[in-house]
Amino acid sequence: MTTNTGQAHYDTIVVGGGAAGSVAAAALADAGKRVLLLERDEVLAGRARYFDVDGYRLQWGPHLLEDPGSGITAILARFGMTLEHGPTNDGMAVWDGGHWQQAGEFYQSGRADLARVAGEVASLDLDQLDQLDQVALGDWLAARTDNRRVTELFEFMAVLEGQTGRPQDHSASDNLFMRSLHLREQRKPGYSYVPVGGFEHLFEQVGALAQAGGAEVRRGVSVAGVAVEDCTVRGVYVEVGERRVPNEVLPLERIDADTVILTLPAWDVLGLLPGGDVPAWYLDLVARMTTEDARGSWIGFYAALPEPPAVYTPRELAVWFGTARTGLPGFAYTHSMLDPVSAPPDGNLFVCGVACDLAAVRDRRRLATVLAGFEADMEELYPVLAHSTFRVRHVITNFGLKARPGLVGAMRPHNVVPGIDGLFVGGDTFRSRSVGIDRAARSGLTCAELVLGERVGGLEDTWRY
Ligand SMILES: Cc1cc2nc3c(=O)[nH]c(=O)nc-3n(C[C@H](O)[C@H](O)[C@H](O)COP(=O)(O)OP(=O)(O)OC[C@H]3O[C@@H](n4cnc5c(N)ncnc54)[C@H](O)[C@@H]3O)c2cc1C
């Protein structure tokens, strides 16, 4: 049964309290709108949650935030909140299949070429990036340099940021967007940090900011559908009560609103988009974006260690295209060096992983074999791992969409859902540039602006997609 309990009527209901939803709610509340933020979990954070294990804080989702300054940092500052950047990584170690090398050493032979290409990247016209949405990063680079080292450095960054394993999966537009922002704002090709206090703390702060602006935040509420009449949004349906058996069908209640922003990842949103009203081509586009092949995934493990396992410097990021047993590209770093609250004072939290296809990890026995091979590879690369006091192995299937040519920027479903007035979708799996927290936050702001019908003052120059 569906009831409308005669509750308050909202200007906008934002569904999902992760990076996109909490920023959208804060922006709309700041603009004086009557906002309701509905989050299924008891915490605001979305994929940026953590779990405590033996005194260590293991990030379930994001490891490092890559906002050079003009993204989530500037957005939150505009609404009165300071996002404090923790320590940044201080180097990059590259495993070339046989040895470690510092990134500087690695591209020594291509220094002049690298400076020239980096100069071009820094001055790219970001408004024209759509033209590169179908171009592979390797092809864009090949037209500018034949130095393999330069190309590999860009591709290492693509592995680190996007978990896209194969060179043909690295789009030119999304990857150059990231490089360009870093180069122009921080004068280096990469810049990443953990917010002081961690990610969950950050989004609880953003939720509090929205509430201070007048937004209502309800946790533990699962939205079951969007209410639509005459091709116009009327609100959302939420489930009422608690399931006593896992398949119990709960009664629904309608909460009224003029506009609704859904910030669930694309692979979850299809269940909430009203099928009869939204045109089939749009639903097909969302479905095509989220096939197994389109989703970034990886396997890896956390390890607790008495010493930080640095190759060159404690805050470095390490990267490779393939280790001996798995042959898969991946990354490693000591998370507690960048996020001190993630380990006790006498411990270090090491994190590593390799990008792989979803299909490859669906078979649990195959997954166990690849993970065992990966651990053996890591023990050779980092002998100190023999002293780890615990390891937590994991498989990630909800990282995001691969930033692959043809699947990025203007090729993705638009934030305005066609066929229904007042319905919007946001987050880094819809129209945005590249993957991650910063992009999700920018997308949340975009959705708020679409509701408002104008750019938020002071953020007109924040680049979105
Ligand atoms: C393992 C992993 C590692 C990552 N590493 C990085 C990284 O290093 N750097 C980086 O920047 N990004 C990283 N990301 C990506 C980053 O987590 C996402 O880009 C970001 O969290 C997306 O935010 P969002 O608000 O768009 O979506 P989400 O965080 O997914 O938020 C959606 C919210 O909707 C809620 N919800 C879902 N269904 C309903 C419903 N029916 N009713 C009500 N609420 C609902 C969910 O509970 C959730 O809170 C990583 C992700 C993963 C999984």
Image (cartoon, helix red, strand yellow):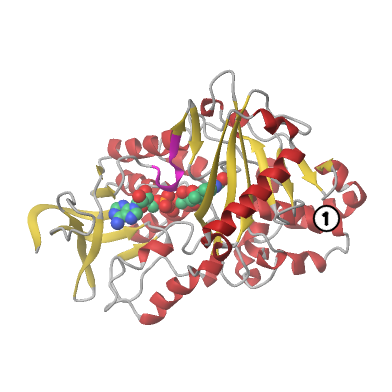
Part of the protein shown in magenta = 45-51
Residue type at tag 1? Val
Q: Is residue 368 left or right of residue 223?
A: right
State the residue at coordinates (79%, 46%). 95
State the residue at coordinates (51%, 40%). 73
- Disc 1: which residue: 150
Quarter of the image with the N terminus in it: bottom left
Quarter of the image with the C terminus in it: bottom right
In the image, residue 47 lies in the stretch drawn in magenta: yes
State the residue at coordinates (67%, 35%). 89
> Where is residue 100, by image quadrant?
top right
Q: Is residue 219 above or below residue 258?
A: above
Q: Is residue 359 above or below residue 378?
A: below
In the depicted view, which residue is nearer to us: 361 or 365? 365
> Where is residue 42, by image quadrant?
top left
In the rendering, at what x and y percent does residue 181 appear?
Answer: 64, 50
